[in-house]
Image: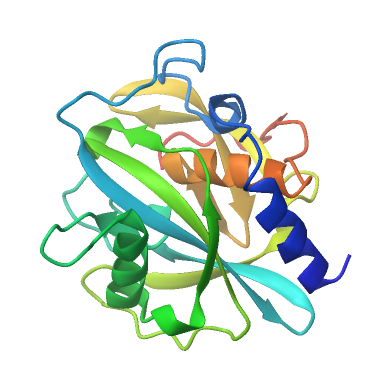
Amino acid sequence: MNVRQVVEQLEHRLQQPLPGAKAQYRMAPAHRPGPDVDHAPPPHARQAAVLILLFERAGQLYIPMMQRPPDSGPHSRQISFPGGAYEEEHDQNLAETALRESEEEMGIRPEHVRLIGSISPIYVAPSNYSVLPFVGYSEVAPDYVPDPTEVEEVVELPLEELTRPGCAVSSVWELRGQKMAVPHFQIRGKRIWGASAMMLSEFLCLIDRSPEPLLLSTDDTVGR
């Protein structure tokens, strides 16, 4: 399929019942309760949104993500989608949150983005956010203007590489003082894990490119 066909198929699939928790939890760390457990966010959870953006370059589709700078927060140095908290004074809805935060963090111009749907929300316990991931398409590559307080590095991921054998792996890491199996996407020297990997897993299922069976990495790295 060409790029236009992929985007059209994705837009159609986003109107159908979503894969949901079953697809997300395939890439969940071992400490997280499984999809059969009630995964509704607590009533006090804050609302947030992120943008999964597809854009074309040289006949290939790419997804821009960002590596957060080192800090004392729960998501230090992690790879994530652009996005953030709903702000009542600025946003009429969560779609506006995703677009506003993507512009503030990475300089992605909202007028270049056509939102085509959203995937299943996910609760991120360390930051107490209920996150709704929106899917968008841009006919032009973003002209990034990253905010250095939010973004250490812009990471562009070719969609095709995300589904190659060996991209989705599981390694033993030390998290919060415990060793555990952590599924993650390993691509271009980066590791995408946690909520971002869970969102990405469901997204790939929607375009009939679900990740290859998980492999236990030969490098059972302890730590992040």
Residue 38 coordinates in the image, percent (x, y): 40, 13
Q: Residue furthest left?
A: 89
Position of 55 with respect to 47 (left or right) is right
Height in image: 200 above or below 32?
Answer: below
Q: Residue at x 61, y 35 (%)?
A: 18
Marks counted in the figure total 0
Position of 46 with respect to 121 (left or right) is left
Q: Give the colour scheme of this rendering.
A: rainbow
Residue 35 coordinates in the image, percent (x, y): 51, 17
Residue 162 coordinates in the image, percent (x, y): 70, 54
Q: Residue at x 62, y 38 (%)?
A: 219
Q: Say whether residue 34 is visible.
A: yes
Q: Quadrant of the N terminus?
A: bottom right
Q: Residue furthest right?
A: 1
Task: Identify the image quadrant of residue 93.
Answer: bottom left
Height in image: 206 above or below 156?
Answer: above
Height in image: 80 above or below 219?
Answer: below
Q: Say whether residue 68 is visible.
A: no
Depth check: 215 or 86 in front?
A: 86
